[in-house]
Amino acid sequence: MNTPDIAPLPAPPRGSPRRDRSTSARGAGLRAGVFLLRALAAAGAFAAAAAHPAPALAEEPSAAGVDLVVDGASWTLDPDAVRAAIARELGASVTLAGAAAAGRPTLVLRGEPDGRVRLSYSAADDRRIERTIDVPEDPDRAAEAIALLAGNLVRNEAAELAAAFGKRPPEAPPPAPPEPAARPAPPPAVGNAAPPGAARPAQATRAARSAPPEPPPCALPGARTVVLGADVLPFVGTSTVDGTNVVRRYSLNLVGGYTAGISGLEVGVGVNIASSFMCGAQFSAGANLALGPARGAQFSAGLNVARSLSGVQVGSLNVAAGPVTGAQGGVLNVAAGAVDGAQLGAISFAAGASVDLQIGLANAAVSDATDVQVGLVNLGVGDATDVQIGLANVAAGKSTGTQVSLVNLGAGESTDVQIGLLNVATGKVEGMQIGLINYADESPFSFGLLNIIRNGRLHLDVWGLESGIVMAGLKNGSDHFHNIYGIGVRVTGDRPRMVFSLGLGGRITLGERVYADLDLLGYSLHEPSSANPSAALVQARALLGVRLFPELAVFGGPSYNVSFGETAEDAALSPYGSIPLRIDDSDAQRGWPGVVLGVQAF
């Protein structure tokens, strides 16, 4: 039983908030561009009727039509839909080709960043013209805009418009002399006989544009719609009688089934194949293959494949050869286009212009913009990666937002925040690093046990304490935080002792030559003969520094010290007495206020 070839229109694809923000300002420009193309086409038709026909850009294409080459298109466009729209616009056949052929009129369509496309037309005599325009995100409106541009290039309507205003178009030969008398209009072309670049009255031009509108995305021109189809094997079943150029409302398959389109529900045990589109749902234990766009859901225990996806794929292996608007959930998810939604699985890979969300054991996004990755291992390769949360995060683009992991690597020009045990930023840290070990080329805030800032502060300090300890060490760090590493000796007391120190602190710049440091240090005192520790000292200090010369400063300030020793004698480091905090048979602690004086170089 056959029914009319009508299918319900699907809900419009959901846009991500980030893409909505980036394209909302462009929406008016897109509509204005399409309107301008329409106005240019109408003006060209008026010029053809009211003035001498302007010369074409190149020799007119042959009666065999025009070739269309789609080169590197990564946007949500169906090449066959674009070909059909251009054919209606030109009123002649358009053939999809893998590459431009010498001596053939050829249109070459290439994708550009941010939804732009570049369309070039090469005539049979090798002369060439091209234009770049923004296209709407809706595939049907995008195909219409590209078709209008193709008509503009093939007919060179810009030259016709210039002729209508009495101007010679640049680089065009002189206009042909007027014909002595108007010729009667030729009979309508049959098949592919009419060359797309041939001059014709404005009525014929408009007639080509008034062709029936392109069918909705869930219908196929020339295909019959049947309520039910069933196959045991591809081409064995109702497809034996009905053929494969049909759109099925309901499809049942055993080992496998093949049809042009699904506009409803398809259930199979083995493999379900829709050669042109799938609108609705496919269920299979083996595989669902939509060789055109899929709008709806694909559920399989094995493999799901779609040229582009607006909906959901759930299976062990999910593959979208184009953009994804929706979600993929499985063991392995692959999207060769932008992901406006989510990928949820053990391993997820996306290679489109943008990726919203990836959650899995291992996530990889080779994308200009990646929003969020959550997994054990996350890799973002592109201009910008916003958030990565996992055990190991790698962002190799120009800018990285936030990384939270045991190991974080930001290999781009700038990184906002890194929190982990090991943080590495090969560029500039705009926000902060918090970890055990931090490395950055530049950083205003790196807080950890060891901070290495390649273009940060590095000073050589020499300072002394009231307890007879004299130290020399390095102070290095970011603009506001630093680490201190020192070595020295205690020269007072009953015997000299080696001293090692480790500390961290912060700096406040008070003026061009004046600064304040707030530091917390730990000192370890060792016997010189055996290197065994004999006492420890914890010190908090507030220092005021004055830079006498660009490479030399003096500093000093109060401190408070707490000493630890196995005996009260070991803890007695203050020369003027101290407060016993704790004294017993195994431990002694004493505290006292002190003073620090020193000099700083570099």
Image (tube, rainbow, N blue to C red):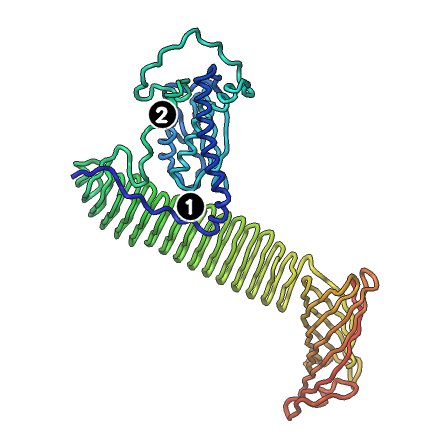
* Quarter in which the N terminus is drawn: top left
Query: Going 48% across and 31% down the picture, which residue do you hit?
Result: 36
SS of the residue under disc 1 = loop
Among the two numbered marks 1 and 2 on one chain, the one whose residue lies closer to the N terminus: 2
Position above or below: 451 against 465 = above
Residue found at the very far right of the displayed protein: 548
Residue in the picture at 59% in, 65% down: 434
For residue 209, which quarter of the picture? Answer: top left
Amino acid type, label 1: Ala
Q: Secondary structure at mark 2?
A: helix
Residue 534 or residue 111, whichever sits in front: 111
Label 1 sits on residue: 336
Question: To which residue does mark 2 refer?
Answer: 208
Q: Alpha-carbon neighbours of circle 2 within 10 Å: few (<14), some, or many (≥20)?
A: some
In the figure, residue 460 lies in which quadrant? bottom right
Amino acid on which disc 2 is placed: Ala
Q: Residue at x 48, y 37 (%)?
A: 134
Q: Looking at the image, which is closer to me, 254 or 28?
A: 28
**Which mark, residue 90?**
none
The one of 444 and 237 positioned closer to us in this rendering: 444
Instruction: Give the foreground label among 1 and 2.
Output: 2
Residue 167 occupies quadrant: top right
